[in-house]
């Protein structure tokens, strides 16, 4: 959130709008939607493998099925997967060379 507000100062995000909840993700998301009376719900999802590319994640899918508001699902960047791949690809590189590349 802080990165977004630095890059886009006119963005209406602020720390007062952030909620952290525990429990069943679908129930908590639907509760927040009802409480906030939102016009549109935007959710991020990660695709995991070929199966993940063809279906929406279980939380996002359940929110879509149960939500009375329109839901837009956005595929999130795969930083973790790319980082793991990079580490694997460089696993045989010596420490000095690896430091120079970084």
Image: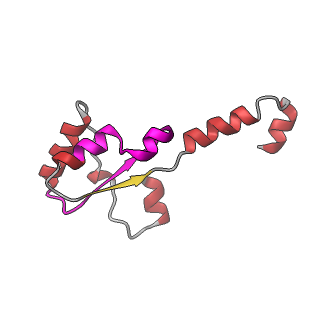
Q: Percent position (x, y) of residue 61? A: 28, 44
Give the tally of numbered discs. Answer: 0
x 13%, y 54%: residue: 68
Work out whether 13 lies above or below 94: below
Within the image, what quadrant is residue 46 found in?
top left
Work out whether 19 lies above or below 14: above
Q: Quadrant of the C terminus?
A: top right
x 17%, y 57%: residue: 69
| 84 relative to 65 in the view: left or right | right
Q: Percent position (x, y) of residue 88? A: 70, 32
Q: Percent position (x, y) of residue 27? A: 18, 38
Question: Which residue is more in the foreground, 42 or 49?
Answer: 49
x 81%, y 44%: residue: 101
Work out whether 37 lies above or below 90: below
Work out whether 80 lies above or below 44: above
View extreme (bottom): residue: 10
x 29%, y 48%: residue: 18
| 74 relative to 92 in the view: left or right | left
Picture colour scheme: secondary structure
Q: Which residues are magenta?
A: 37-63
Magenta run includes residue 46: yes
| 88 relative to 6 in the view: left or right | right
Magenta run includes residue 69: no
Within the image, what quadrant is residue 72 found in?
bottom left
Within the image, what quadrant is residue 98 found in?
top right
Q: Percent position (x, y) of residue 86? A: 69, 39
| 92 relative to 26 in the view: left or right | right
């Amino acid at each position: 959130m802080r990165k977004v507000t630095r890059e886009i100062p006119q963005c209406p995000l602020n720390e007062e709008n952030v909620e952290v909840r525990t429990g069943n993700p679908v129930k908590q998301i639907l509760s927040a939607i009802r409480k906030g009376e939102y016009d549109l719900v935007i959710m991020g999802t990660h695709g995991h493998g070929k199966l993940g590319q063809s279906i929406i994640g279980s939380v996002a899918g359940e929110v879509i099925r149960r939500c009375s508001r329109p839901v837009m699902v956005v595929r999130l960047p795969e930083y973790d997967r790319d980082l793991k791949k990079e580490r694997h690809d460089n696993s045989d590189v010596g420490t000095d060379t690896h430091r120079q590349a970084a």
